Image (cartoon, rainbow, N blue to C red):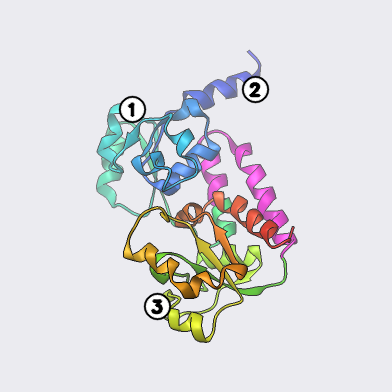
Amino acid sequence: MPASALGLAADAALRVASLNLCTDELLLMLGRSEQIVSVSHLSHSPRETALWRAARGHLANDGKLESVLARRPQLILTMGGSGGARQALARRFGARLIELPYASSPSEVVAQAAQVATLLGRPAAAAAYRDRLAHLERSRPGLEEGAFLSGGGLSLSPQGLGASWLRLAGFRQPALTNNRLSLETLATKPPKWLIRSDYRADQASRGTAWLDHPLIRRLTPRTLATDGRPWTCGGLPMLAEVERLRARRGLQ
């Protein structure tokens, strides 16, 4: 059997589970379908991720290690620390638990993707995402003030991961008190652009109703809608969202 075929068989034989929406994205975008034994229940929801169709091809878990052990994964991905007890439990069942830190920049996102791709036995799978980020970095547009806006006036920290993605799209996130964009600010010192998230926009609540205020409606000519789901993790799906926002402004 050729070496390439042997490698393919090894890739497919690796059984991998993810316990976190953000590691679900990495696994779904970098792994082979045959490798995936479980993803978190959040990934089955169209409200949470654009990858829900792919995710629904795999069993859902509740985010707890115990909920995937019966599937006998060899590799388990999650994000954020959980302590030594879960590590010990995973080892007892013959699994390796990888707890990734939350990325703080687009370059860290892509570096993390390369790390996961290597763990999956598929190091080349991350190359296309690395190249897309490199292109976005090389072709950075001039910045204009643009505030991210979600339900209840929630915005972003100028120092955070989300603001870094905004800069790649050509927007400079302003500093806002408590990272919220108030109606008073919109009335007295509005940003040039609003990048309005549609996250859970179909749900009736006080938070989303805030976005229907007449003052915001009048700002429609300088408002760009953005798919709010990729912003939750700020991971690989943000590459496509940055490209889309640039295109909406006529930038490439």
Kindly identify which residue carries mark 2. Answer: 4
Q: Residues within 10 Å of mark 2 (few under 14, many from 20)?
A: few
Q: What SS does tag 3 mark?
A: helix
Q: Which mark lies nearer to you, 1 or 3?
A: 3
Query: Could you say where residue 191 lies in the image, as x and y percent from the top left?
Result: 57, 78
State if disc 3 and disc 1 touch (CB < 8 Å).
no
Q: Is residue 170 left or right of residue 25?
A: right
Residue tagged by mark 3?
A: 178
Q: Position of residue 164 (x, y in %)?
A: 57, 66
* Nearest to the observer: residue 180 or residue 187: 187
Point 55% across, 80% down: residue: 190
- In the image, the segment drawn in magenta is 111-140
Residue 211 at what x, y percent from top left?
Answer: 44, 67
Question: Of helix, strand and loop, which one carries label 2?
Answer: helix
Q: Label 3 sits on what residue type?
A: Asn
Question: Which labelled disc corresponds to residue 201?
Answer: none
Look at 52% across and 24% down and name the residue there. Answer: 10
Write the residue at 57% across / 45% down. Answer: 114
Q: Tell me the kind of residue under disc 1.
A: Arg
- Look at the image and say whether residue 127 sits in the magenta stretch: yes
